[in-house]
Image (cartoon, helix red, strand yellow):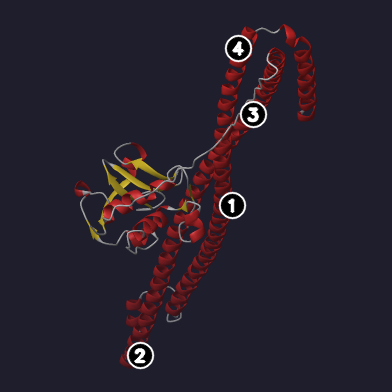
Amino acid sequence: MREIRGLVKDSVVVVTIMSSLFFVQTVSAETKEEIQAQRSEVQSNIDEKEQELQEIKEELIELNEQIMRLDEAIEDNEQKIDETESEITDVEEEVSELEEKIDEIQQNIERRNEILKERISSLQENGGSSSYLEVLLGSTNFVDFVDRVALVHKITQADQDLLESQEKDKLEVEKNKVELDNKLEELEDMKAEYEEMQQQIVAQKEQNEELKDELKEKEEENSEYLDDLKIEDEILAEKEKALKEVEEQQRAQEQATRSNGSNGAIEQYSSNSSETVSVSGSTVDIVTSVGEKYIGNSVYVFGGGRSAYDIANGRFDCSGFVSWAFKQAGISLPASTSGLSSVGSKVSASDMQPGDLVFFNTYKTNGHVGIYVGNNKFIGSQSSTGVAIADMGSGYWKSNFSGLVRRVGS
């Protein structure tokens, strides 16, 4: 298609030039002014389209970079999901083994009960009674009575040992079962969180891909229109050139000694502006504002923000972002929500100040953390947005605010 358009363009230009040269003698001064006005308008349209195309190209570059970040995040999160599923499988196997152990202990308990019954019945000659008192009363003499007392004591002591052993086994199994059940529940919650986050990232990528297709279509349309404008401008330029040559010939004939020349220069230039970012010297100003450059230019990745590559590409999870922000102010903090939940000093939610750490209950208690910036808002890396300023005075973040606020420094 491009080649065909090029051939058509060349043909139109050639035909127009020949026509201009042939009919140029009949063109008036008014026609020349009209041509100049038309060309001025065309050139203005060309400038506008070139500017619009440049903006579209810049948008496409940003979209491609964002899509690359999302692809990396999707790949990393898939790996996290696979690891979590593998860990869930391992825990389920442990639970299954523990249930088998419970069955085995129950069988041992039943066997021990049979042993107790056999011990009692072995003391009965007629097998009609299982009472220790009847065993004692059945003695034939005092020596037999003493022997039976000693034997009954030995049996009861053995019974006590067996009962204590059974109770100990039960408690140990119950404790292990509770721990594994809690671990399994936490892993299931984490998997659900990963999958929800993955869906959000995939949806965001699909939206970006659709926008990218729209921009490409718009770019192609504008490029074709720009080509048409340039063809029209070239045609008008040739007409203007032909008129100028005729005028020069006429002036040369009238005044042989007079010479005319014209010089034109078109200078194009562009300037680039540099952006200077200044950071306030106070800790609060730094930690609440240093991350703003990532707003709309980042992606949430579990475990992100711990490497130079992640930081350069705006890949953070919530605790990684908080740790990085405070590091810019010269303060070293843990890069985990559990570690951050115990740093500094605890303050009341009613006394929150910018720079305080605020925590939210997501897949677990205090599973999300951000930096309070004032006016019921906090900055953090959220799974649905990447680094962003969120409102904790209403909606999801208000209902999931845990009430925990930690103050690191001033």
Residue 356 seen in this snapshot? no
Task: Tell us which disc is closer to us: 4 or 2.
Answer: 4
Q: Which residue is mark 1?
A: 75
The residue that appears at 37% across and 75% down in the rendered structure is: 164
The N terminus, quarter of image? top right
Q: Disc 3 marks which residue?
A: 217
Of the residues shown, which amino acid type is indicated by label 3?
A: Glu
Q: Nearer the viewer, mark 3 or mark 1?
A: 3
Total numbered labels: 4
Q: Which circle's residue, 3 or 1, is located before the other in the chain? A: 1
Q: How busy is the neighbourhood of tag 3: few (under 14 within 10 Å), some, or many (20 plus)?
A: few
Q: Amino acid at mark 2?
A: Asp
| Mark 4 or mark 3, earlier in chain | 4
Along the line of sight, which residue is nearer the eye, 128 or 346?
346
Tag 3 or tag 2, which sits nearer the N-term? 2
Q: Do the residues under discs 2 and 3 have CB atoms within 8 angstroms?
A: no
Residue 295 location (% of width, % of height): 42, 44
**Secondary structure of the residue carrying numbered label 1:** helix
Asked if the residues shown at circle 2 and circle 1 are in contact, with their CB atoms under 8 angstroms apart, the answer is: no
Crowdedness near tag 4: few (<14), some (14–19) or many (≥20) residues, C-alpha within 10 Å: few
